[in-house]
Image (spheres, coloured by chain):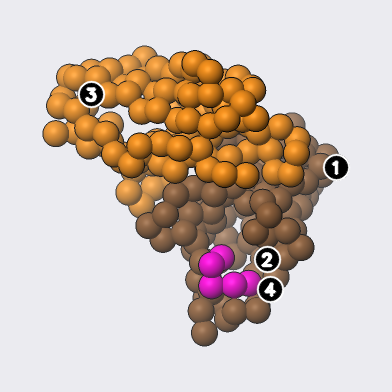
Chain colours: A orange, B brown
Amino acid sequence: QSALTQPPSASGSPGQSVTISCTGTSSDVGGYNYVSWYQQHPGKAPKLMIYEVSKRPSGVPDRFSGSKSGNTASLTVSGLQAEDEADYYCSSYAGSNNFPYVFGTGTKVTVL
Amino acid sequence: EVQLVESGGGLVQPGGSLRLSCAASGFTFSNYWMSWVRQAPGKGLEWVANIKQDGSEKYYVDSVKGRFSISRDSAKNSLYLQMNSLRAEDTAVYYCARGTTAADPWGQGTLVIVSS
């Protein structure tokens, strides 16, 4: 199972928006509405930010939103804040063949 | 408070074994799939293994098949990862997480170093 493709880095100034893409195939991202996004600060455990493409867990600010078109999912962070600077990983269900889950390659978001 | 606490990591020689544990609290452990995820130093996240609520289904990433075994004990609210025939490339922080498609929360992680 190949990792989903994310850009290595993204950046924006405070208050601006940044969008991160996550590209897979019809066997994972495109085939199921089970895309999730995780935020990870240095030295910390990952935190769930978005699940099932666009749903936010309780406590996650509505500045974080998710979407999907075809084989590509996206995470948008609006109104960037300093604390949003972190690594972000997407993940998708990939069916019951072999191993059913896959992560993206990760994107480092920098707040300028 | 929902909490996961991993233990059992450490330094082990290539070819050796370790057993990781994950103690769960604050939720009904037997109601959830559970997962192990690892992160090599400076690298991204990698799913390692998942286990169904009753232990009847288990999945492993190809790189650990035949060497790692995931298990759970609902009486002890605990998840385990038995790691045998360890290799240098298994060096990583190992996290346990509740769930699979929406893994939440995660433990703080336990570091496994495979080196002679």
- Dot 2: what SS? strand
Q: Chain of mark 2?
A: B
At a point 65% along the width and 79% down the height, the residue shown is B15
Residue at mark 2 to residue at mark 1: CA–CA distance: 20 Å
Residue B58 in view (yes/no): yes
Dot 1: element: loop
- The residue carrying pointer 4 sits among few (fewer than 14), some (14 to 19) or many (20 or more) residues within 10 Å by Cα, namely some
Callout 4 amino acid: Ser
Measure how far apart labels 3 and 4 are at the Cα level: 45 Å
Amino acid identity at mark 3: Leu
Q: Position of residue B113 (x, y in %)?
A: 50, 71
Q: Residue A59 vs residue A34: left or right?
A: left
Residue drawn 52% across the image and 84% down it? B116
Determine the main secondary structure of the stretch shown in magenta: helix
Write down the region rendered in magenta.
B86-90
Residue A13, quarter of the rendered image? top left
Chain of residue at mark 3: A
Q: Where in the figure is residue B102, as x and y percent of width and height?
A: 58, 30
- Secondary structure beneath dot 4 equals loop
N-terminal-most mark, 1 or 4: 1
Q: Which mark, by number, is residue B85?
A: 4
Residue bearing the label numbered 1: B56
For disc 3, the neighbor class at 10 Å (few under 14, some 14 to 19, many from 20) is: many
At label 2, which amino acid type do we have? Met
Labelled pair 4, 2 in contact (Cβ < 8 Å): no
Residue under label 3: A80
